[in-house]
Image: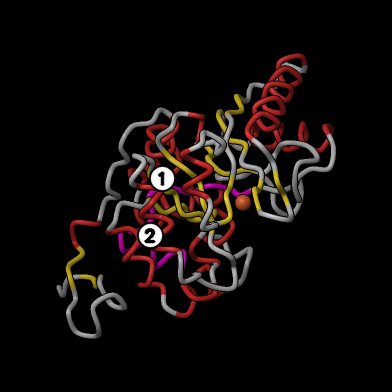
Amino acid sequence: MIDLHAHILPALDDGPPDLEEAVAMARIAVAEGTGSLVASPHVVRGAYENDRAGILQAVEDLNGELGRRGIKLKVHPGAEYMLDPDLPRWLGEGRALTINDSGKYLLVEFPSAGIPPYSAQTLYEIALQGVIPVIAHPERNFDLIRDPDLLARFLERGAVCQVTAGSLTGLFGRRIQQVGWYYLNRGMCHLIGSDAHSPGYRAPVLSGAAGAVSKALGGELSELLTSGNPGRILNGMSVLRPAGAETLTMYPGKGFFSRIFRRREK
Ligand SMILES: [Fe+2]
């Protein structure tokens, strides 16, 4: 499997505080069937101001250490950007780090409290530069928990959705679990990532969610979300539409943006 969202670089954010914890996370990822992983330290103005050069160096250092210890995990560079009106400018200036430095996909998160009014404009300005925003764990955002369909307006404009593995297995509570499965059931989730922060509570594990998706919705979708699409993104290729999306239709009943998708009546 390929995990596109993991805070594994030591001492850069609220992930592992030192190299030993980072290595412990890498061992867990390998044991749970992950072969490649994108390091995605937070970039948040005033809190975690990680820069491109520092992240690239930290990835190189960690890969060297994993190699010396014989741990078969390939770590790729990336970052998780808090949506910020200046993000498109940073991207244009070559300061932002896209997923695997491919220049094609950028991992972004909304503040957990809600969707700021500048979101659509900022995502649009990112897309104008030929870069596809990957929206991290929308199922954990307060506005989207209240109205999950609000995500559709961003997906319609080309954004890609990453649901967090732990959300699907109930790590963050029942409501977040429901919203995560809602996105899966409606073909609104393109990939699953661990959003790992530690070897313990939030470990780099996709296997539990992969098994649950396989059981509920089929092995093909599980493979697409944990390997197929993450691999395509890693290599700068277009994602495949999740299976089941064809069964969705426009639903004009309750407002233009708030209820766009609904499962077709049987
Ligand atoms: Fe994250």
Whether the magenta-drawn stretch holds residue 186 is answered as yes
Quarter holding the C terminus?
A: bottom left
Residue to which mark 2 is pinned: 184
Amino acid type indicated by mark 2: Leu
Amino acid type indicated by mark 1: Leu
Please indicate whether residue 18 sits to the left or right of residue 149 in the image.
right
Please indicate whether residue 107 sits to the left or right of residue 53 in the image.
left
For label 1, being within 8 Å of ligand 1 is answered no
Residue 173 location (% of width, % of height): 61, 71
Q: CA distance from mark 2 to mark 1?
A: 10 Å
Provide the secondary structure element on which disc 2 rests.
helix
Q: Residue at x 49, y 41 (%)?
A: 91
| Residue nearer the viewer, 127 or 33 | 127
* Mark positioned earlier in the residue sequence (2 or 1): 2
| Residue nearer the viewer, 56 or 218 | 56
Check the image and report above or below for 74 versus 127.
Answer: above
> For the magenta stretch, what is the residue range?
179-195
Whether the magenta-drawn stretch holds residue 227 is answered as no
Task: Characterize the local packing of mark 1: few (<14), some (14-19) or many (20 or more) Cα atoms within 10 angstroms.
Answer: many
What colour scheme was applied to this rendering of the protein? secondary structure
Residue 131, located in which quarter of the rendered image?
top left
Q: Are marks 2 and 1 in contact (CB under 8 Å)?
A: yes
